[in-house]
Image (spheres, grey):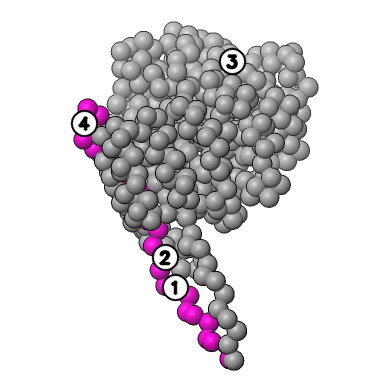
């Protein structure tokens, strides 16, 4: 919990630095006979971040966990050496207890207003968040609640209230980078980011629906869930099509990606970037996998991705769809024997604790579409659209870099944790799954898939 919330709070803290309250400029002095020397630029800018959570009462464990995560985030921000206006930024955390009580929460909010904080992370439930938000708004202080889910919070008419959602915990740092780039794009005071990671607002399918209807502003979602609304996304998941993410991004960053973005817009979603969700590999608790025959009879969990179901069935395994949030327990209890995911997800979710065999199958590439609701996009000014586009482009480049660096390190760590790693006969696996391509070429996405296959192979 603490690590996940630290990522969310880190993103939130950076966002608050991005759109934090600035001191008003003093009135211009009267004309003087001679111009005075320009004042020296400040060597350090102090950014005060308020944190409010229930550190006493029935859910004190959650509040303390969040506060510890916030302190860890502040330490990381200070270690990063960020600058604002050319001066070094020093982040300070001012923590208050609201005991999950609206009255005490309002009192805590007033303390932070009096302390002239630049922004606030918290509170941790809608009952304390909504009344406190009025105080922050009146004082011109942006607020980000990592877990308030009542839509009233973002529909009070306060400037630029956004909710940003990422399902996988390893994306949290990228959302922080996105907020930093929002600062660079000078949207201070207009755009406010609320981060809700780890499926706080529902699973992938629910969030796709929410972003299409405008109930959710942005989501970094899964390829499989998005392909339910825009089937052409499935074209990039054909078995053994890409051996590296770079090969896929060569297509996605060109005309084929632009065509996919247009199809997404027609379904109510604006593509801000195509993120890297990695090359996928298989784990199980039963036996090492080196050849196709080793897959026979294994009960393998898949996400809501029809192509993955076809791949598993072609290899002789039994596919079962289980939500990612429920996967660890399902593996622990033997509901399924195994699963498939990128290394970063396997590691971050500690699946190595319940899966001792890892086969480097590289059977599928998957992206993470970074999407904005078209209804939200249409409400933005041209200047803010430009700022969001530029920030998202930089965040996309960073996320891809982070993903590649993580893969380079994680395999050794998984081995050190006792996971038995095997390689497979990829030619035999590709031959066994060749019928998957043929099946999907006969579907409505066939014309688009044909262009992707021709470009990739």
**Residue 64 as seen in the image, left or right of residue 5:** left
Q: Residue at x 43, y 11 (%)?
A: 299
Say which residue label 4 marks: 57
Q: Is residue 209 above or below residue 452?
A: above
Q: Is residue 321 above or below residue 40?
A: above
Q: Earlier in the sequence, mark 1 or mark 4?
A: 1
Say which residue label 3 marks: 306
Residue 397 % position (x, y): 58, 47
Task: Specify the segment rendered in magenta.
Answer: 34-59
For marks 2 and 1, give the CA distance: 7 Å
Residue 408 % position (x, y): 44, 43
Q: Is residue 204 above or below residue 90?
A: above
Say which residue label 1 marks: 42
- Looking at this view, name the residue that lies furthest to the right: 447
**Mark whose residue sits in front, 4 or 3:** 4
Helix, strand or loop for the magenta stretch, by majority = loop
Residue contact at pointers 4 and 3, CB within 8 angstroms: no
For marks 4 and 3, give the CA distance: 46 Å
Q: Is residue 453 visible?
A: no
């Amino acid at each position: 919990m603490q690590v996940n919330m630290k990522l969310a709070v880190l993103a939130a803290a950076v966002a608050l630095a991005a759109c934090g309250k600035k001191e008003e400029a003093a009135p211009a002095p009267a004309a003087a006979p001679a111009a005075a020397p320009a004042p020296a630029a400040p060597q350090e800018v102090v950014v005060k971040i308020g944190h409010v959570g229930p550190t006493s009462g029935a859910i004190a464990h959650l509040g303390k966990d969040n506060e510890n995560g916030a302190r860890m985030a502040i330490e990381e921000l200070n270690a990063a050496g960020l600058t604002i206006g050319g001066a070094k930024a020093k982040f300070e955390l001012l923590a208050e207890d609201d005991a999950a009580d609206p009255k005490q929460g309002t009192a805590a909010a007033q303390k932070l207003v009096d302390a002239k904080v630049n922004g606030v992370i918290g509170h941790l439930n809608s009952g304390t968040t909504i009344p406190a938000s009025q105080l922050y708004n009146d004082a011109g202080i942006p607020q980000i609640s990592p877990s308030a889910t009542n839509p009233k919070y973002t529909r009070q008419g306060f400037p630029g209230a956004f909710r940003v959602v990422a399902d996988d915990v390893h994306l949290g740092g990228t959302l922080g980078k996105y907020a930093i780039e929002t600062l660079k794009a000078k949207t201070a005071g207009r755009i406010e980011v609320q981060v809700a990671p780890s499926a706080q607002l529902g699973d992938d399918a629910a969030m796709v629906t929410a972003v299409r209807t405008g109930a959710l502003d942005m989501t970094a979602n899964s390829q499989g869930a998005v392909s339910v609304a825009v089937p052409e996304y499935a074209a990039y998941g054909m078995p053994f099509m890409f051996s590296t993410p770079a090969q896929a991004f060569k297509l996605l960053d060109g005309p084929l990606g632009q065509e996919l973005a247009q199809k997404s817009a027609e379904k109510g979603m604006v593509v801000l970037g195509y993120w890297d969700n990695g090359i996928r590999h298989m784990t199980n608790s039963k036996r090492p996998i080196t050849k196709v025959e080793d897959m026979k009879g294994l009960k393998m969990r898949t996400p809501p991705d029809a192509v993955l179901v076809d791949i598993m069935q072609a290899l002789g395994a039994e596919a079962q769809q289980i939500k990612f949030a429920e996967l660890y327990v399902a593996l622990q209890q033997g509901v399924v024997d195994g699963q498939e995911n990128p290394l970063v997800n396997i590691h971050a979710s500690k699946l190595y604790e319940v899966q001792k065999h890892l086969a480097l199958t590289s059977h599928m590439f998957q992206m993470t579409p970074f999407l904005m609701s078209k209804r939200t996009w249409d409400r933005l000014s041209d200047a803010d659209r430009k700022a969001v586009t530029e920030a998202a482009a930089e965040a996309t480049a960073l996320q891809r870099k982070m993903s590649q660096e993580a893969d380079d390190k994680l395999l050794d760590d998984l081995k050190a944790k006792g996971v038995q790693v095997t390689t497979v006969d990829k030619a035999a696996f590709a031959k066994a799954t060749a019928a998957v391509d043929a099946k999907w070429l006969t579907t409505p996405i066939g014309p688009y898939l044909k262009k992707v296959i021709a470009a990739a192979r």
